Image (cartoon, rainbow, N blue to C red):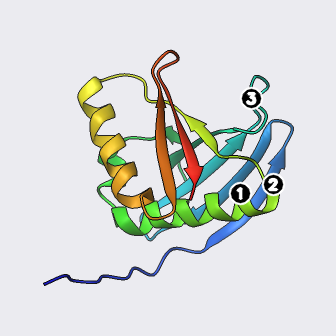
């Protein structure tokens, strides 16, 4: 039997346009998140995308599994997916580019999370030469 689960996503609170791209912000009960789509000079149709989390009223820190897994992980990731879908529809780019740096095992975990959560709306392609990934909207 297949179980269908729906999640109410967090509402993003504001958008900020910077000289390098766009930042979107949303909050959970525990953390504040920033999703960034930054200009990519080499491939303008594929802006760089990433997100950061911070404890409310604290400095932003780079994405870390220990931060996001202490929150409602699917709600957070679905909100990020919705923000990317919105950005994609407004700016008409072909997709987004991202990479993982650091521990290979943690990178594999993050990629599996991205595939599970983004898989309905996005394809994930790997560029082996540059060790980078592309999110392509379905």
Question: What residue appears at the point 30 percent right and 46 percent down from the top-left corner?
Answer: 112
Where does residue 49 sit, x and y in percent of width and height? 61, 41
Residue 67 is marked as: none
The location of residue 124, given as percent across then percent down, is 47, 44
Q: Is residue 49 above or below residue 85?
A: above
Q: Which residue is drawn at 29% across and 35% down?
A: 108
Q: Relative to the observer, which residue lies in front, 116 or 25?
A: 116
Nearer the observer, 103 or 129: 129
| Earlier-in-chain disc, 3 versus 2 | 3
- 107 with respect to 24 (left or right): left
The reply to whether residue 59 is in sight is no
Q: Is residue 124 among the parts visible in the rendering?
A: yes
Could you tell me how far apart the alpha carbons at marks 3 and 2 are, in whole angstroms?
A: 14 Å
Mark 1, secondary structure of its residue: helix
Residue 106 sits above or below residue 81 on the image: above
Which label sits on residue 43? 3
Query: In this rendering, would 18 be left or right of 58?
Result: right
Q: State the image coordinates of residue 34 (x, y, percent, origin top left).
A: 60, 52
Q: Mark 2 points at which residue?
A: 91
Q: Which of 42 and 73 is in front in this view?
A: 42
Q: In which quarter of the image is the C terminus?
A: bottom right
The secondary structure type at the circle numbered 2 is helix
38 relative to 88, above or below:
above
Image quarter where the N terminus lies is bottom left
- Give the residue at x 54% y 35%: 98
Residue 88: mark in rendering: 1
Circle 1 packing at 10 Å, graded few (<14), some (14-19), many (20+), is some
Q: What element carries label 3?
A: loop
* Residue 73 x, y percent position in the rendering: 35, 61
Whether residues under marks 1 and 2 lie with C-beta atoms below 8 angstroms apart, the answer is yes
């Amino acid at each position: 039997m297949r179980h269908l689960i729906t999640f109410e996503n967090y509402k993003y609170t504001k958008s900020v346009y910077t000289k390098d791209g766009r930042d979107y912000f949303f909050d959970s009960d525990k953390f504040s998140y920033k999703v960034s789509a930054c200009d990519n000079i080499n491939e303008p149709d594929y802006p760089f995308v990433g997100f950061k989390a911070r404890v409310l009223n604290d400095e932003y820190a780079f994405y870390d599994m220990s931060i996001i897994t202490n929150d409602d992980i699917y709600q957070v990731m679905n909100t990020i997916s919705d923000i990317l879908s919105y950005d994609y529809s407004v700016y008409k780019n072909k997709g987004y580019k991202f990479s993982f740096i650091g521990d290979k095992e943690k990178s594999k975990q993050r990629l599996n999370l991205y595939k599970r959560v983004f898989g309905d709306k996005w394809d994930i392609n790997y560029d082996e030469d540059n060790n980078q990934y592309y999110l392509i909207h379905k």
